[in-house]
Amino acid sequence: MNWSGRRVLVTGAGKGIGRATAVMLASREARVLALSRSADDLASLKSETACETICADLGAIDQIEAAVKPALPIDLLVNCAGTTTLQSFVDSDLSEFTRVLGVNAVAPMVLSQIVVKDWLARGIKGAIVNVSSDAARRGVVNHTAYCASKAALDAMTRVMAAELGPSGIRVNSVNPTVTLTPMGELAWSDPAKADPVKARIPLGRFLDPDEVAEAILFLLSDGAAMVNGVSLPVDGGLSVS
Ligand code: NAP
């Protein structure tokens, strides 16, 4: 893939998987528009790379259009920003459930609509990668909102692929298992919790953010020209073990 000059919007680019994706794309000469919430993260990203930055809170759904429209036109989109909450099903409260669904599923829908309408108007054959999770297919204890949001994102990915494929627009998701981002390190640093999960992963370890970024770049790239509507496990084989 020749990334040179391709404009790629990456959300959640301040930390973790989104940042690794933005840095990898920038190192391959793509023109990256890095969107995230914390200004400090974006300032440090800007000092390390040639990324342009957009500071916005995707939880504020009605502000997404104003934040993103000035960045158009773009060629490719990565919906990576995500959040979670730890609540059992019976104790899940509506405001937290709605907040998580908002950032993880509604924001990617609204953002993708803005981008896709622009692509359709200009006849651009773009590609979108939604960063989902292995939690989309599993019942992870105390993750009602997160699992529901990622299952919604996978379902939306399939509908987008079916509807937009005839216009040459591809939409896929990646579904990583535990990835050692700042958030992942915090949640999985206790060996008593981590080791039994690692033991179920045939490749025997958690992921590095760059390993998810490589899968995202593949799905964005012309190398995946006939890959459309998949939810790609990036999980060392956990899903088949
Ligand atoms: P992370 O380290 O917490 O980074 C998430 C990034 O998204 C941060 O820069 C964060 O900014 C930004 N973000 C969160 N909410 C936002 C909002 N409302 N508006 C704008 N930006 C927002 O998380 P990660 O582990 O890299 O996760 C990235 C994606 O991968 C998520 O969708 C997550 O569900 C998915 N995933 C992660 C794992 C894992 O084990 N780490 C596994 C499977 C899937 P602030 O820090 O400023 O809030």
Image (tube, rainbow, N blue to C red):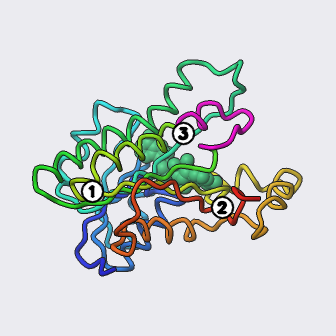
- The answer to whether residue 232 is left or right of residue 21 is right
- Image point (60%, 57%), residue name: 176
Bounds of the magenta span? 136-150
Is 10 situated above or below 30?
A: above
Label 2 residue SS: loop
Residue type, numbered disc 3: Ala
Give the amino acid type for the residue marked by disc 2 in the picture: Asp
Q: Residue at x 57, y 70 (%)?
A: 211
Disc number at residue 54?
none
Residue 64 locus on image (x, y percent) = 29, 39
Local packing at callout 1 (Cα closer than 10 Å; few below 14, some 14-19, many 20+) is: many
Label located before the other in sequence (2 or 1): 1
Where, by quadrant of the figure, is residue 222 drawn? bottom left
Check the picture and name the quadrant holding the C terminus: bottom right
The answer to whether the residues at label 2 and label 1 have Cβ atoms under 8 Å apart is no
Relative to residue 66, is residue 170 drawn left or right?
right
Q: As drawn, is 161 to the left or to the right of 174?
A: left
Q: Work out how far the residue at label 2 is from the one at label 1, CA to CA, in angstroms.
A: 26 Å
If you read the primary sequence from the N terminus, does the residue marked by circle 1 or circle 3 appear first? 3
**Residue annotated with mark 2:** 235
Residue assigned mark 1: 169
Q: Position of residue 55 (x, y in %)?
A: 34, 49
Q: In the depicted view, which residue is nearer to us: 151 or 190?
A: 151
Which quarter of the picture shows residue 44?
Answer: bottom left
- Circle 3 residue: 151
Furthest residue toward left: 122
Query: How would you rate the neighbour count of disc 3 (Cα within 10 Å): few for under 14, some for 14-19, many for 20 or more?
Result: many
From the top left corner, tell me how far across and down residue 161 is, in percent: 35, 50
Amino acid type, residue under disc 1 in the picture: Ile
